[in-house]
Amino acid sequence: MYGLEAIRVGNGWEIAIVGISIVFTGLTFLSVFIGQIHKLLDLWDNRSEIQLFKKKDNKKDSVIIKLTENQKIVAKQFSLLVKILDVPFSLPRLLVLAEASGVKNPHSNLCLLIKSGIIFPDNEGFHLWDREKFKKLVA
């Protein structure tokens, strides 16, 4: 068996049609992508204007929280520990100091201080202590 009969028996026509369809579909998607790439480049050039890429000011977004007496005591303990550290300070180092000093529930209390805005990020990987907010919440 040779020629067109062999192609028919071996499903050659179907395979050829499927192959042509795959190549045509791939080329169509590629041409559409190349035709629209200018929009992606404009988006990349203007990324500073898009809300997705803007840095948030976490100090303004803090939640107003009322501290209990025990939380005020813990906040005062953390304020003493922050005075030991360099400014700005790292949270892991503050947690190590808090655990070594015997502060109760250091992780949850540190989270509370962050949520209340007393501790806020400096957008470079470190954190700062807001003395004014600390005085308002603890006093």
Image (cartoon, rainbow, N blue to C red):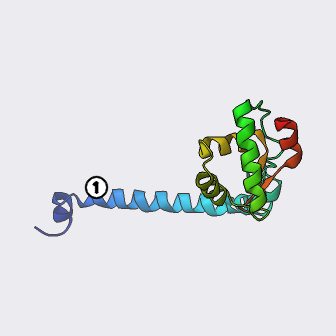
Above or below, 103 relative to 7: above
> Does residue 89 show up?
yes
Residue appearing at x 87%, y 41% in the figure: 135
Residue appearing at x 86%, y 36% in the figure: 139
The quarter holding residue 124 reads bottom right
Of residues 82 and 121, which is closer to you in this image?
82
Residue appearing at x 56%, y 62% in the figure: 30
- Check disc 1: other Cα within 10 Å, few if <14, some if 14-19, many if 20+: few
Of residues 26 and 76, which is closer to you in this image?
76
Spot the residue most to the bottom: 2
> Does residue 115 show up?
no
* Residue type at tag 1: Glu
Instruction: Describe the element under mark 1 as helix, strand or loop.
Output: helix
Left or right, residue 135 beside residue 9: right
Spot the residue most to the left: 1
* Number of numbered callouts drawn: 1
